[in-house]
Amino acid sequence: MKRTALYQNFPNPFNPETWIPFSLSEHRRVNIRIYSSRGHLVRTLNLGQKPAGEYLNREQAAHWDGRNDNGELAASGVYFYTMEAGELMGLRKMVVMR
């Protein structure tokens, strides 16, 4: 089985939406948090409980519509994302280009 890992989003840079692939070594609750370059939380993607496996394509990966938790479009710029799946896994960078 694959290890638990967070991969690079695609497309990157993106407008208006992107997908965030990941893999899980065991059944876990998954949350992906997206932060501005200043460290402010922009969006939390609560994916719920997921079985072990790979979530690599558009049908399976986490989807971000480029909006913040208030439903407003995120501004152009650099963002960072993390995944929590039992423990904090990885930090990656992505770019919104409006």
Image (cartoon, rainbow, N blue to C red):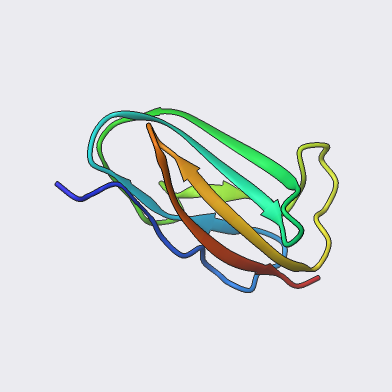
Percent position (x, y) of residue 54?
29, 49
Percent position (x, y) of residue 4?
29, 46
The residue located at (14%, 46%) in the rendering is 1
Locate residue 43: give its quadrant: top right
Percent position (x, y) of residue 15?
71, 67
Residue occupying the far left of the picture: 1
Percent position (x, y) of residue 42?
74, 46
Q: In this view, does 91 lie above or below 48?
A: below
The residue located at (81%, 70%) in the rendering is 98
Count the marks: how many?
Answer: 0
Locate residue 16: give its quadrant: bottom right
The residue located at (55%, 70%) in the rendering is 11
**Left or right of residue 41: residue 46:** left
The residue located at (23%, 49%) in the rendering is 3
**Left or right of residue 19: residue 68:** right
Q: In this view, does 49 lie above or below 25?
A: above
Locate residue 77: give its quadrant: bottom right
Q: In this view, does 96 lie above or below 74?
A: below
